[in-house]
Image (cartoon, rainbow, N blue to C red):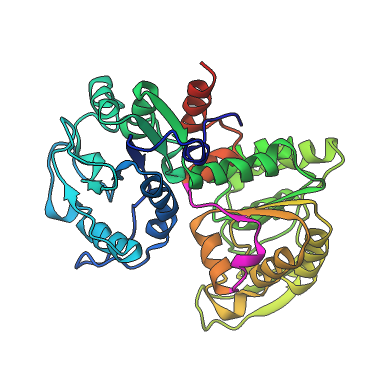
Amino acid sequence: MNVIRFADLCAQGQVAGKRVFIRADLNVPQDDTGRITEDTRIRASIPAIQMALAAGAAVMVTSHLGRPTEGAFKPEDSLAPVAARMGELLGREVPVLANWVDGVEVQPGQLVLLENCRVNKGEKKNDETLARKMAALCDIFVHDAFGTAHRAEASTYGIAQYAPIACAGPLLAAEMDAISKAFLAPKRPLVAIVAGSKVSTKLTILKSLANNVDQLIVGGGIANTFMLAAGLKIGKSLAEPDLLSEAIAVIEAMKARGAAVPIPTDVVTAKAFAADAPATIKAATEVEDDDLILDIGPQTAQALAAQLKQAGSIVWNGPVGVFEFAAFENGTRTIAQAIAESSAFSIAGGGDTLAAIAKYGIEKQVGYISTGGGAFLEVLEGKTLPAFEVLARRANP
């Protein structure tokens, strides 16, 4: 994807003395006291900031945090806890500025964090007046928030339209490169794992992938619906019988291309959804009326693992069972380990997927771990993200 990259501007000496506005994704989880409970996104924002400071820029950073009401700032909306953690990581104080839209005083070598951008009236609707005011604050706009790349808001899209230069920060550029490698020119076979509780939430993703991948592995409640579509009984397992025709259409679309949606041959069941519920491994043809399917069986897991190890590219979104419960984690663990051992380029995204990756300690064996939830899902749907579109347009006027 042809976009201007902030790293290139820095290397070319075009950043020294310039006002740089970085849109980061600092929307981190907090407890009831405001303490940050997980700081991955803050740590992911640091390279762009360090790059800008090292290049001699006057640096402004902003992000949304939580779901504030536009025009009604409350103490819990503040980025102050983020500034404190960012300061620890950078080894310097990071001042927080409120009411910044009409002007910011920042000198080369300085860094300021601009208060929660979602508090500004017109942010979510991409108000042109607001976007132009933001653009006037800077010489270079750096989009480095993949987690917001699917939203056309004033601080993510409008500012990119009107800033003198609009470019991709290192985090966003890495996402673009990984997505291009996985989807635009993938090494075959391309295998996608799509799991979750409902087909309905990922139906467009399944349909899009059915036109592109060589193998589509489904898991969780989604797999139950596909098992129903294949004529198997699933007991009282979570499924969506009203979407059987859609599941059959996906299976047929894959079959028409000589591809497949593997249906589990064995499963792990329980009589109740509980961590201490006795687990029973049985053939997929032997599920009883009062059974809950909570994981794929070991035979199925091994068959899928063998296929993953032969893949050229792997896209992973969602655990294939209730991996939070020890008795029902084997399928997800086996899949994770197979991805880690595969020579394929792998890209993974989604909150539960990242939790599984962390649980099984395979972070360094996954080719790329996406930082965006909704944005990653929209990529899987085959959509062009607004951030990608506007940055490509600005690079090719």
Identify the residue shown where x is 65% and y is 61%. Answer: 366
Q: Position of residue 372 (x, y in %)?
A: 48, 48
Q: Quadrant of the N terminus?
A: top right
How many numbered discs, if any? 0
Q: Position of residue 59 (x, y in %)?
A: 30, 43
Classify residue 57 as left or right of residue 362. left
Residue 326 covered by magenta stretch: no
Identify the residue shown where x is 41% and y is 34%. Answer: 151
Residue 368 covered by magenta stretch: yes
Identify the residue shown where x is 29% and y is 47%. Answer: 109
Q: Position of residue 161 (x, y in %)?
A: 39, 22
Against 29, is 18 above or below? above
Give the residue at the far top of this rendering. Answer: 397
Against 264, is 48 above or below? above
Locate residue 177: give its quadrant.
top right
- Regarding residue 245, the answer to whether it shows in the image is no
- Regarding residue 261, the answer to whether it shows in the image is yes
Q: Please report the bounds of the magenta region as a residue range.
A: 360-373
Locate residue 282: give its quadrant.
bottom right
Give the residue at the far right of this rendering. Answer: 258
Closest to the observer: 124 or 94?
A: 94
